[in-house]
Image (cartoon, coloured by chain):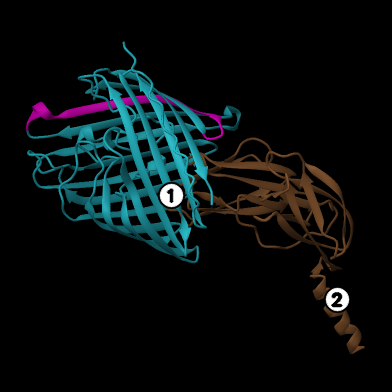
Amino acid sequence: MRVCILATTLLALAMGSSTIGGVAAGELRGVLRADARPVMDAVIWLEAPSAPASSAPAPVLDQHNLEFLPRVLVVRVGTKVKFPNNDRVFHNVFSFRDGKRFDLGVYPIGAVKYVTFDREGVSRLFCNIHPNMAAYVVAVDSPYFAASDANGAFTLRAPPGQYSYKVWRAGMTLREGRVTVDGVTPLVVEWP
Amino acid sequence: MKLAVLVLATQLAASAAFAQGLNAEVSGTAGLSTDDVAAAATQVRVFGELRHISIFAEGTWTGSAIADGVRSEAFSTAYPYEGPPRVMDAYLERRIGDGRVFGSVRAGRFRTPFGIYAASEHAYNGFLRAPLIRYEGYWSLTNTMLEHGVNVMAGTSRLQAEVTIGRPADASDDFTRRSGTDLVLRAQTYVGPFVIGFSHMRSEAYDLPYAVGGMQFTGVDVRWMSSGVQVRGEWLTGRPWDDSRTSGGYVDVSLHRPFMGPVTLVSRLENLDYDTPDPAYADVASGVTLGARVKLIQGLYGQVNVSHRPTQPYGQNTTATDVALTYTLRYRH
């Protein structure tokens, strides 16, 4: 019996798995590329609209040193995002086009405002005071998502199984496909 | 009316690789005014954070073509509009705190933290002229006042206080303060949709033969915003030197509603009263400005202002139209 538990634990650790919504989770790793080069700040998500809700703390889109951090934030639809101002100067965060439309106005250092992204889509965020501050919030109807790092690499966790996936990056066409989450098979998505 | 030749802004390509955590930004502005002024300005900024120390440095260069005998404050938003390339801000800042209670220490060269003083709140933000109370020609505070010193700030999101001790290091074209020790106090509170600040400063007078004694100003600034409508303003009173008094303020309104797309409309109402023992030198100036800032493509903004100064205009015209294009490129690490 002990050997069985130990083996199961080792297998779970080897697969990088944990528990999501009471279901044994797998891990999907992969790389996103365009013209054979890694693509940073791309978003991948697995379609799972009926997946259980999670109780993660509000994700943060910071304003710090005249930048939005992170530049691309992916959240599940219905998520409340925290927008602190951690700069000595004022910022005026707004999104007027696609996705969620809002204007947070100006607020000082240390102050925090919140926005709930209540529908699917990409919101383009700007600061009306600093024209080169820009960020994206990608709201997806799934709890299984990730954004790629500087090497184009991503890791997401989801219950093992087959999924349809989508990959978004600013200025590029949406990529779609099917993938199996088994903790083993990596996913490579390339834009031509 | 003769329009001066448009001078193109220089765009510098920053090819150097920056250490992680630093960004660089280059802004170029070219402008024309019916005041017979053409100007081109470039600013280069480096900013970011290394080892939890925030860094900000900004250099500026401006070339202007002004007709003989013409005076104008066109394009004098937050930078000197003549003279050689020069450093504006150059400071390090360490911030501490847990988000609810925080503080910071800033050291180096920075703008005098009085009222609404950040360059980003004055330059190329819809207005192409500094407010009367922030232009050097009207004997008040100017947007080119700088300190060499230390600024300490502490507070919460609801209330912050800061103390600055420094020495004048102004980047003005014509009027700089005498050497000495400056003290600037500022408190800022955030209540509902309002941000309210109080500032007080003691410094040296401008380095002019008739300016004796010290400079002292006290002011209040207010910001309010709701649904794309922003109202901000500041009012100050004090003396640029002994036996004189300057009081005045401005109210800016900017309108940026969703249906307006890339267009932001701006307007300003302002007043300044300069009293001196000799009435021949006293000024009462007022002005109104209407304008727009339009995002043309990413990074490129067009701006147009119509300014009317019915009394004591700085230039020869009581009404002037200014247009400018500003392009900004940011290089990320």
SS category of the residue bearing label 1: strand
B9 vs B143: above or below: above
Examine the rendered structure and indicate whether residue B62 appears above or below residue B116. above
Q: Is residue B64 above or below residue B149?
A: above
Q: In this orientation, which residue lies closer to the viewer: B27 or B226?
A: B27
Of helix, strand and loop, which mostly describes the magenta segment?
strand
The chain displayed brown equals A
Number of other residues with Cα within 10 Å of mark 1, as a class: few under 14, some 14 to 19, many 20 or more: some
Q: Residue at x 68, y 38 (%)?
A: A171
- Is residue B76 visible in the rendered image? The answer is no
The residue at which mark 1 appears reads as: B46
Residue B281: which numbered mark, if any? none
- Spot the cyan chain and give its letter: B
| Marks 1/2 same chain | no
**Residue A34 screen position, x and y as percent:** 72, 45
**Does the rendering let one see residue B52?**
yes
> Where, by quadrant of the figure, is residue B75 drawn?
top left
| Residue B319 x %, y % | 32, 18
Instruction: Give yes or no for residue B297 being in the magenta stretch.
Output: yes
The magenta-colored residue range is B278-299
Q: Which residue is depicted at the point 81% across and 69% down? A: A19
Residue A11's label in the rendered image is 2
Q: Residues within 10 Å of mark 2 (few under 14, many from 20)?
A: few
> In the drawing, does residue B37 fall left or right of residue A151?
left
